[in-house]
Amino acid sequence: MTPTEAEPLHLDSSRGRWVLAVTVLGSAIALLEATVVNVSLPAIGRDLDAELGDLQWVISGYLLTLASLILLGGSLGDRLGRRKIFEVGVIWFTVSSLVCAVAPTVELLIAARVVQGIGGALLTPGSLAIIEASFRREDRARAIGAWSALGGIGAAVGPLLGGWLIDAVSWRAIFLINLPIGVLIVWASRRYVPETRDPAEAGRLDIWGSVLVTAGLACGTFALIQAPERGAGSPLVLAAAVVGAAALVLFVVLERRSAHPMLPLELFRSRQFTGANLVTFVVYAALGGVFFLLAIFLQISLGYSAIQAGAASLPITAILLALSARMGALAQRIGPRIPLTVGPVLIAAGTLLMRGIDIGDSYAASVLPAVIVFGLGLALVVAPVTATVLAAADDRYAGIASGVSNAVARTAALVAVAALPLVAGLSSSDYQDPKLLAEAFDTAMLVMAALAAAGGALALATIRDDVLAQSDDDEPAAGTHHCAVAGTPLHGRARTSRT
């Protein structure tokens, strides 16, 4: 049997295990590049003489193209072949990782990160879509559960491994390690992964929609990052803000008029879908801001090594692995409103505890309690909010709804990373001063806590418990869906809600 034959696979077969391994490794490298690089920022800053705005672009450049193009990447896979687009994404990602690793200047590193995000946008949707389309119906839930669990283990090990590579070798090693992994993925994909596509996909690709949303996010990000240096009233900053806002408005107009939109706006007629995505945006903005500054703060102000900073957030990942599925089941049983109200409040509480971390404090006494409370709140959010988004959309929009949720989460992190230094009063090389950084971190965590708490208030006001209600005749799910931060998917299909 050749890999192009779309006969359903058994998970327990040799080929089925290879397909699972390929999709896990593919999603893992894209996920880790969005997290491990945070730990490397101080080292990059020292080596390339980069200012804070440059470091923001190292993170934001990747998130920008990933968030803007992930829906297009999913559409390309459905039309042209999921395996084909997945492999193109892996090759693209791997080559750009090599450019990142050898970049002699921060400007070239930023450009390579932007290109790397395109690869991530091509391979990320394909990873889960390959499993959904390749395995027989009775094996899909188990396959996706294994994919999520293994991906979670990778997320746990990644920052620790990245920190060790930074300390033992160089920050460049966190990009070089993608090369052998990328080669292995492409080889195994060509040999074992069947090609699948969606024959129902028709019409023209929404290229202009992708261009407009990318331009809008890029100009808005530029305005936020440049404002601390040039001033909010700078003609260049104002022009970028106006162009970005205009591009996003035109994107909405285009999507309303397009016969085949990248983002069907009728999805947002559902109050539950809109409310869940608003909660996602606000809470994930808080998460993005915390993870961006925490790794820098631990290294610059508290004197942690890169490996210590990478290990500091391990309790969060451990809590997610242990509790995400249970919290998803709880939301299915009692409804998502309470978890999505309490979870963000706990995230806010954990973020406020981070404000109490002072220079010279020990990890066990100050950092650990904060990350435990933060992790507990996150575990209450990740599975229920994703399940609510999917349940609120018609079944025919399940794929696009999942993509929208992922894109919203990435965009929220992008906005947070771009805006946080401006809000906290941190600019230029201030981040290299332990005291100045500690003061800015204190302000930033207060803002992030307020954002997270606002997410809880939004959930209380907009989310209904019956959005996940199942009737007795609902059949069990053949598949599950993955949230934007590699939490365990919620098992079982919820009956859709339309109001």
Image (cartoon, grey):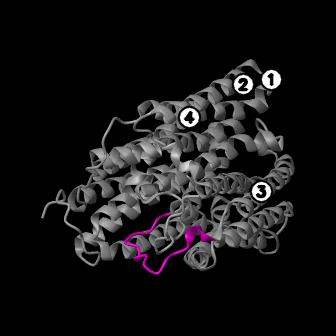
Mark 2 residue type: Val
Find the magenta span and give its range: 466-482
**The C terminus - image quarter:** bottom right
Q: Which of the two discs, 3 and 2, sits closer to the camera?
A: 3
Give the answer, above or below, for where 453 lies relative to 145: above
Q: Is residue 470 above or below residue 404?
A: below
Measure how far apart labels 1 and 3 are at the Cα level.
29 Å
Asked whether the viewer can see residue 98, the reply is no
Q: Is residue 481 within the magenta segment?
A: yes
Q: Disc 1 residue type?
A: Gly
Q: Main secondary structure of the magenta part?
A: loop
Disc 3 or 4, which lies upstream in sequence? 4
The amino acid on which the numbered mark 4 sits, given as a three-letter code, is Val
| Residue hosting label 4 | 252
Mark-to-mark CA distance, 2 and 4 = 23 Å
Q: Quadrant of residue 20?
A: bottom left
Badge 4 density bin: few <14, some 14–19, many ≥20, Cα 10 Å: some
Residue 352 shown in magenta: no
**Of the residues shown, which amino acid type is indicated by label 3?**
Ala
The disc placed on residue 237 is 2
The mark that comes first in sequence, 4 or 1, is 1
